Amino acid sequence: MIEQFRNIFRVPELKRRVRFTCLLLIVYRIGGHVPTPGIDAHALALFFQMMKKYGGFIRGIRLGSKTAEFIERILDRITLLGALSLAGISILPEVLITQMNVPSFFGGTSLLIVVGVAFDTVQQIESRLLMRQYEGFLRRAKLRGRAS
């Protein structure tokens, strides 16, 4: 396993792609400290003030700025996990081709598009079935917008 990991850095093309992905992750982390367009900091502060005013809280977290920091930290972690999984999916075809000699007809970008379209299709089918009072064909799946 360790030898296969070392072999990744012996292939110049794969080494370049891994380095590029690491640089993208660094840019992502730096960009995390830049205000996001479309999200108004004043509106968030107002939201947390209203949450405090009406008694909303998160168990174990003090009200006010501590709650805001906690929610921001959770959102950062979720975003980082999503970015890492997308980077892994986009590199997967290259690793399969170069390290395991598996013929692949999809690149990283097309694989991301296929996965996104598949999730969107399943979500649309579920919403149509729920609209017609069916329970759904994926009973154990936890999809956004699903009532149960």
Image: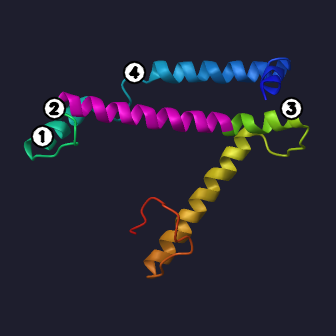
Give the residue type that dot 3 points to.
Answer: Gln
Q: Where does label 3 land, which residue? A: 99
Q: Could you tell me which secondary element the residue under label 4 belongs to?
A: loop
Q: Could you tell me which secondary element the residue under label 2 belongs to?
A: loop
Q: Residue 83 at what x, y percent from top left?
A: 55, 34
Question: Quick one: label 2, few (<14), some, or many (20+) residues within 10 Å?
Answer: some
Cα distance in 3D space between marks 2 and 1 = 7 Å
Q: Earlier in the sequence, mark 2 or mark 4?
A: 4
Task: Relative to 118, say whether 28 is above or below.
Answer: above
**Residue depth check, mark 4 versus mark 3: number of the one nearer the observer:** 3
Q: Could you tell me which secondary element the residue under label 1 belongs to?
A: helix
Q: Residue 91 at what x, y percent from top left?
A: 72, 34
Is 72 magenta? The answer is: yes
Task: Relative to 63, say whether 136 is above or below.
Answer: below
Cα distance in 3D space between marks 3 and 1 = 54 Å
**Residue depth check, mark 2 versus mark 4: number of the one nearer the observer:** 2
Cα distance in 3D space between marks 1 and 4 = 26 Å
Disc number for residue 52: 1
Q: Residue 28 at what x, y percent from top left?
A: 52, 24
Task: Relative to 147, say whether 31 is above or below.
Answer: above
Cα distance in 3D space between marks 2 and 4 = 22 Å
The part of the chain drawn in magenta is 65-88
Asked if the residue under mark 2 is in contact with the one under mark 3, i.e. CB atoms within 8 Å, the reply is: no
Q: Where does label 2 land, which residue? A: 64
